[in-house]
Image: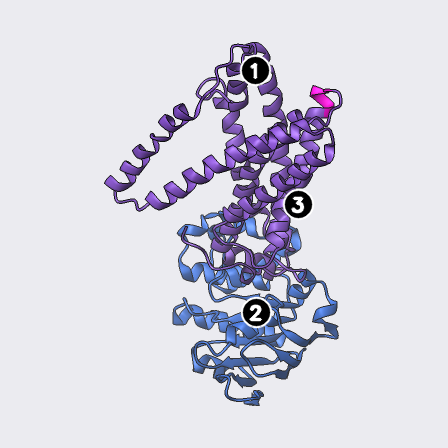
């Protein structure tokens, strides 16, 4: 479970909300309304004042590398730091099994792991980054436009995978320009508006 | 000693060569005339002044004056490092980084070379300490500035890749390990290349100076070999210290990449 208390990010009204186990919250708002900054702040990649709790752990009292195993942020344009995707994965046998399952569920051939990242398509890179993000089973997953480069068929596969994560008890925060995707997946919706409004609270969709 | 003194008229004749640079700048519309003139004047004044300052300090017996000038050299070299960064960190940390690193490696290298190797009596004589320190600072400064600026530029360019690693739970040193390696390699390249070119393409300044002053060339090369190793060691140590310090400077204690701690890139 993710609980946010009076989180202050520069240029945004203080935010408080809760996303339960197995719940998904859609994050909406025009460009520049701070969706990505909120997402990054949840993973403590961007400075913000206030409290964030995940399953009882508090952000400021948790070493950042550990915190980012609790709150996994996947950027809209994930960066790669290795020549091939395989080098980016840890090689321990357990995670290899999870990796194979995730690859199969996203229609990715294992052969892609040994190709140079630079020759992979944007969509392949995006799905591989999702595999990397989910492989250690983080309890909170923050996804910034996870299907922006995908065709409808692969988008459906990603949504299927996310539904499976929700059933397994993860909490998901989803940024998407596709409103119908948020409708399909989310239990809550948080509308971020420009600074004029002094509060922002999520509305329950179901 | 077969030493020939230069008079002011001879210097003025040499200075007329600046007109060649001026002509190039004018012919190719480089717009460098002003900078060129200012820097030429600056060079002349600085060197003339340091000549008188050194002469005066050599006449003093107190090592305090030597120490004082050494500190001023370290601080100025620290400023020079910061001025070579294409993206300057906000605040004074960058100056502390530059001067602090030089203070450490300048002290170690100079004491090692003068007290440990050359061994004049007493060892802290300014005519040994200050030239050696100057050569160490000049070279270490280049290595440190290259390391720091490569690290900063690469981190800015590879931001998404670095943040991807942080987001997956890497600490800041792990997330920046490739960046740091590239920066160190870049910072060490000039001194490594200088070793290859020494004596073939370039006759190093100190050796040339000693030969012009009448010293036996073989004796002069021995000094030069010694100083090259001292400089190489100082540059390597300085690059490593500055590399780690720069990683700390562009990140924070919460292991975030903080490019907002840098000023926007300057075009110069």
Label 2 close to label 3 by CB (< 8 Å):
no
- Residue A7 position within the rendered picture, expressed as x and y whole percent measured from the top left: 63, 79
SS class of the residue under badge 3? Answer: helix
Q: Residue at x 56, y 12 (%)?
A: B215
Residue A92 located within the stretch drawn in magenta:
no
Label 2 close to label 1 by CB (< 8 Å):
no
SS class of the residue under badge 2? Answer: helix
Residue beneath disc 1: B221
Along the viewing direction, whichever of B248 and A118 lies nearer the viewer? B248
Instruction: Name chain A's colour.
Output: blue
Query: As displayed, is residue B204 above or below residue A155?
Result: above
- Residue A13 position within the rendered picture, expressed as x and y whole percent measured from the top left: 57, 83
Q: Tell me where residue A71 sits by quadrant.
A: bottom right
Residue B33 horizontal side relative to residue B157, left or right: left
What chain does mark 3 sit on?
B
SS class of the residue under badge 1? Answer: helix
Asked if both marks, 2 and 1, belong to the same chain, the answer given is no
Asked if both marks, 3 and 1, belong to the same chain, the answer given is yes
Give the chain coloured purple: B
What chain does mark 2 sit on?
A
Q: Residue at x 75, y 68 (%)?
A: A61
Specify the segment rendered in magenta: B115-120
Quick one: quadrant of the N terminus of chain B?
top right
Quote the CA–CA distance across marks 2 and 1.
58 Å
Residue beneath disc 2: A40
Asked if both marks, 2 and 3, belong to the same chain, the answer given is no
Q: Residues within 10 Å of mark 1 (few under 14, many from 20)?
A: some
What chain does mark 1 sit on?
B
């Amino acid at each position: 479970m993710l609980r946010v208390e009076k989180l202050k990010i520069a240029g945004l009204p203080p935010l408080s909300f809760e996303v339960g186990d197995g719940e998904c919250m859609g994050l909406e708002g025009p460009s520049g309304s701070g969706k990505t900054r909120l997402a990054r702040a949840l993973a403590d990649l961007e400075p913000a004042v206030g409290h964030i709790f995940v399953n009882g752990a508090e952000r400021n009292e948790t070493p950042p590398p550990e915190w980012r195993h609790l709150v996994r942020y996947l950027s809209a344009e994930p960066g790669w730091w290795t020549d091939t995707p395989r080098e980016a994965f840890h090689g321990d046998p357990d995670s290899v099994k999870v990796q194979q399952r995730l690859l199969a569920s996203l229609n990715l051939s294992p052969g892609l792991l040994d190709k140079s990242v630079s020759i992979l398509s944007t969509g392949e890179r995006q799905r591989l980054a999702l595999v990397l993000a989910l492989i250690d089973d983080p309890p909170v997953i923050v996804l910034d436009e996870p299907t922006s480069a995908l065709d409808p068929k692969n988008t459906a596969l990603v949504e299927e995978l996310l539904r499976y994560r929700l059933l397994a008890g993860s909490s998901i925060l989803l940024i998407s320009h596709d409103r119908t995707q948020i409708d399909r997946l989310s239990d809550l919706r948080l509308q971020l508006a420009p600074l004029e409004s002094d509060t922002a609270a999520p509305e329950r969709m179901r | 000693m077969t030493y020939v003194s230069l008079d002011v008229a001879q210097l003025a004749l040499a200075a007329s060569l600046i007109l060649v640079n001026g002509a190039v700048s004018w012919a190719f519309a480089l717009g460098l005339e002003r900078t060129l003139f200012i820097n030429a004047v600056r060079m002349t004044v600085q060197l003339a002044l340091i000549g008188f300052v050194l002469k005066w300090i050599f006449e003093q017996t107190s090592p305090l004056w030597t120490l004082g000038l050494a500190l001023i050299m370290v601080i100025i070299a620290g400023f020079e490092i910061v001025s070579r960064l294409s993206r300057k960190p906000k605040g004074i940390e960058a100056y502390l980084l530059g001067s602090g690193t030089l203070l450490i490696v300048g002290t170690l290298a100079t004491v090692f070379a003068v007290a440990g190797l050359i061994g004049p009596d007493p060892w802290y004589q300014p005519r040994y300490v200050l030239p050696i320190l100057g050569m160490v600072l000049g070279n270490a400064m280049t290595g440190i500035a290259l390391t720091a600026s490569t690290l900063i530029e690469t981190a800015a360019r590879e931001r998404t890749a670095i943040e991807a690693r942080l987001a997956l739970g890497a600490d800041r040193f792990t997330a920046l390990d490739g960046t740091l390696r590239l920066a160190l390699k870049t910072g060490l390249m000039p001194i490594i290349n200088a070793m290859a070119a020494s004596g073939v393409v370039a006759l190093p300044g100190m050796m040339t100076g000693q030969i012009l002053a009448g010293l036996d060339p073989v004796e002069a090369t021995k000094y030069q070999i010694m100083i090259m190793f001292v400089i190489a060691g100082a540059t390597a140590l300085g690059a490593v210290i500055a590399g780690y310090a720069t990683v700390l400077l562009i990140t924070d204690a919460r292991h975030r990449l903080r490019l907002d701690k840098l000023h926007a890139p300057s075009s110069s």
